[in-house]
Amino acid sequence: MARRIMIVCGSPRKKGNTNRVVGWVAEAAREEGAEVEIVDAPRLSYKALGCTACMGCRKSNEFRCVIDDDASPIIARMPESDVVAFASPIYWLGPAAQLKVFTDRMFSLIKFTDTGITTPLNNTSFALIATAGGGIDHGLSLLEQTWKAVAGFLGLPFDSLLMPQCPQNPEELDNASEARERAAAFGRKLAGV
């Protein structure tokens, strides 16, 4: 059965480094038979910028955000994916705000019980695709540590593709065959190859 991969891309630049890398990852995964959905988080229509702590999701038996906008049904579909990958450039040592707005709403995918946490994501893996103009030691490693901690908190497998030293002009990345091959290898890995 084909693996289902959802990539939530938080880059505000449609033709930036992150979206280029996501395209390469998705292309390679599709070539291996995976079903890939790319969510363009910055271009969704939001009624709230992040979680509002309304606790509506706590009053429901469902695992979904009660805010009725573009993000809610996408988040509710995440457990149907074998892999959910989060993609972002590094801005000010962290993810793009556009991705954070989306991921904060994922609070609706957990419920706290007397014995711990319940989540419908039990059969899902998390992954990170991150690009940066600088090295690994600062923003990229911090973002990787954060997502690794989130996956660990939920008991989910985690993997990452970190792309340091990306050019300021994203078109230059098209000529970086090593970067393209690393992205393709990661796409094949997400597809289960």
Image: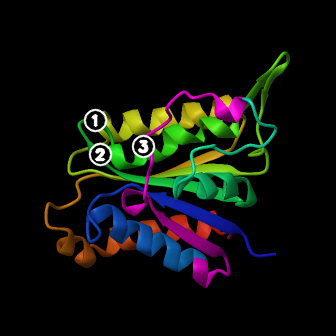
Query: What is the three-letter code of the residue carrying label 3?
Result: Val
User: What distance separates the C-alpha of mark 2 from that of mark 3?
Assistant: 15 Å
> Measuring 51% from the left and 73% from the top, which residue is drawn there?
26
Residue 48 screen position, x and y as percent: 44, 42
Residue in the foreground of this view, choosing between 15 and 107: 107
Total labels: the figure holds 3
> Measuring 59% from the left and 52% from the top, which residue is drawn there?
72
- The quadrant the N terminus occupies is bottom right
> Measuring 14% from the left and 67% from the top, which residue is drawn there?
169
23 up-or-down from 56: above or below: below
Residue that lies at the very extreme toward the left in this rendered image = 169
Q: Residues within 10 Å of mark 1 (few under 14, many from 20)?
A: some
Q: Kindly state the secondary structure of the residue where label 2 is placed.
A: strand
Q: Which residues are magenta?
A: 30-58
**Residue 170: quadrant of the picture:** bottom left
Residue in the foreground of this view, choosing between 137 and 44: 44
Query: What is the three-letter code of the residue carrying label 1?
Result: Leu
Q: Which residue is mark 2?
A: 90
Based on the picture, tell me whether residue 55 belongs to the magenta stretch.
Answer: yes
Label drawn at residue 101: 3
Is residue 130 found left or right of 75 in the rendered image?
A: left
Q: Nearer the viewer, mark 1 or mark 3?
A: 3
173 up-or-down from 50: above or below: below
Q: Which residue is mark 1?
A: 93
Marks 2/3 in contact by CB < 8 Å: the verdict is: no
Residue 37 screen position, x and y as percent: 57, 70
Based on the picture, tell me whether residue 46 belongs to the magenta stretch.
Answer: yes
Marks 1/3 in contact by CB < 8 Å: the verdict is: no
Is residue 162 at least partly visible in the picture?
no
Marks 2/1 in contact by CB < 8 Å: the verdict is: yes
Q: Residues within 10 Å of mark 3 (few under 14, many from 20)?
A: some
114 up-or-down from 120: above or below: above
